[in-house]
Image: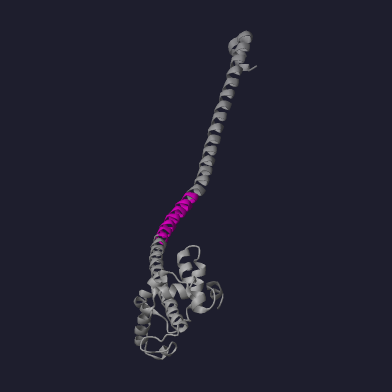
Amino acid sequence: MDVDILTLYGPGMSFYRSQIQLSSSKENGIVGKAKLSSLSVCQLQGIHNKQATGYTMCLQAPMLMCTQRYSSALESLKVSNQNLDHKMSTLRSNVFRLKTDLSKLQRHVRAFHNELLTTWQADTLTRLVEVVYERQNWKLPGGVAVGDHIHLSRERQSRILATAARRIRKPILRKNFGLSVQYYSALQRYDEIVHLRSTNAFRTECTFARRLVSEKENHWGMYRFWGALFPLCYSRSVEESAEIF
């Protein structure tokens, strides 16, 4: 107990007074500790906030880089798509031109095949005229023997053969060669295609035969009409001629 307190208040009051001061000192100590604790918490919070801010900035930097890379990749994709669209447009244009060219080529091929077909038919009818005159022991118009006419000019040959075809009668074809009236009609129109014949009627035998055999199912009428002339004109069937190369 403090001597000053004892002297001032006496033995009784001095005890209580000392207890009051002691309590006050403890309270001041608690308050001081509380203030210190509050200060420490504030300091810790400040440190934590700084750390959190730094951590947030560390997180934001990679995200920003990712966003930039994504934007760059997206822009590259747009440019790539534009280039692809341009290439597709060019490709479609090229395909259209190719189809147009192919269509033109097909028309030319069909026209060429039609011309060839007419030549093959003219050659076969030429052989028919020659065979009929040979077997009948006739001479061609102008007194030219069959076989000798090949030495004449092409124009004169055409006139002689066209005239010879018109002179062949239906009864001769039917009785002596077993040919129907359709062949007579074909000979009457021979002058329309005589100029398209080959220089040698045998040259197109095999080619025409292969054409007839290959299109037998689709063009049965043509196969039957012209194929029937092969044994007479070429001394073999159309199938046999088609196998010759």
Left or right relative to 29: residue 184: left
The picture places residue 147, in percent across and down from the top left corner, at 45, 88
Q: Is residue 171 above or below residue 14?
A: below
Left or right relative to 187: residue 214: right
Report the residue at 58% width, 20% height from top.
27
Q: How is the image coloured?
A: one colour
Report the residue at 50% width, 63% height from top.
217
Q: Quadrant of residue 118?
A: bottom left
- Residue 219 visible in the shown view: no
The picture places residue 198, in percent across and down from the top left corner, at 42, 82
Q: Residue furthest top?
A: 12
Identify the magenta region: 65-88
Q: Quadrant of residue 25?
A: top right
Q: Between 167 and 109, which is closer to the camera in this rendering? A: 167
Quarter of the figure that contains the N terminus: top right
Q: Quadrant of residue 14?
A: top right
Q: Between 22 and 145, which is closer to the camera in this rendering? A: 145
Q: Is residue 82 above or below residue 240?
A: above
- Residue 58 visible in the shown view: yes
Q: Between 39 and 97, which is closer to the camera in this rendering? A: 97
Quarter of the figure that contains the C terminus: bottom right
Report the residue at 34% width, 84% height from top.
159
Q: Is residue 146 magenta?
A: no
Dominant SS type (magenta)? helix
